Image (cartoon, rainbow, N blue to C red):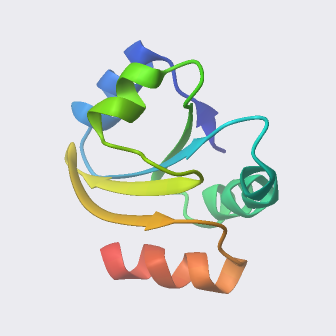
Amino acid sequence: MATEFTSETFNSQVVKGKGIAVVDFWAPWCGPCKMMGPVFEEMSHHYDDLTFGKVNVDELGDISGKFDVQSIPTVIFFKDGKEVHRTMGFMQKEQFMEEIDKVL
């Protein structure tokens, strides 16, 4: 299940976390983000060994700024706290799975 990160949980689960974290940078007013939400949630159930979480760019602008998120939705893949891959824009389920598999 994807969690909604706070500054504290982002730091503990992503920046200082071990393994792979998949982070969706989004906003509630963003149409493509709304379309991406159910796909992201489904993938969080499919890949139990990965950490899935969401960052609301309106509420956590400091985090989105730190990672230079310029458009949304942006999904950033982290491994042991370091960015290893990034996608931008809406993805269908199959495309998202391909992106995840690139990181695994």
Query: Residue at position x 46%, y 78% from top?
Result: 99
Q: Quadrant of the C terminus?
A: bottom left
Between 78 and 66, the one nearer to me in the picture? 66
Relative to 29, residue 45 above or below: below
Query: Residue at position x 79%, y 37% from top?
Result: 29
Between 85 and 100, the one nearer to me in the picture? 85
Q: Quadrant of the N terminus?
A: top right
Visible residue check, residue 13: yes
Task: Name the side, left or right, on which 80 lies relative to 56.
Answer: left
Q: Position of residue 85 (x, y in %)?
A: 30, 66
Task: Name the side, left or right, on which 25 lies relative to 19.
Answer: right
Visible residue check, residue 104: no
Number of numbered callouts drawn? 0
Q: Residue furthest top?
A: 8
Q: Position of residue 17 (x, y in %)?
A: 27, 36
Q: Residue furthest front?
A: 70
Q: Position of residue 9 (x, y in %)?
A: 43, 21
Query: Residue at position x 73%, y 61% from top?
Result: 42
Relative to 76, residue 10 above or below: above
When asked about the image quadrant of residue 93, the answer is: bottom right
Relative to 9, residue 48 above or below: below
Q: Position of residue 50 (x, y in %)?
A: 45, 55
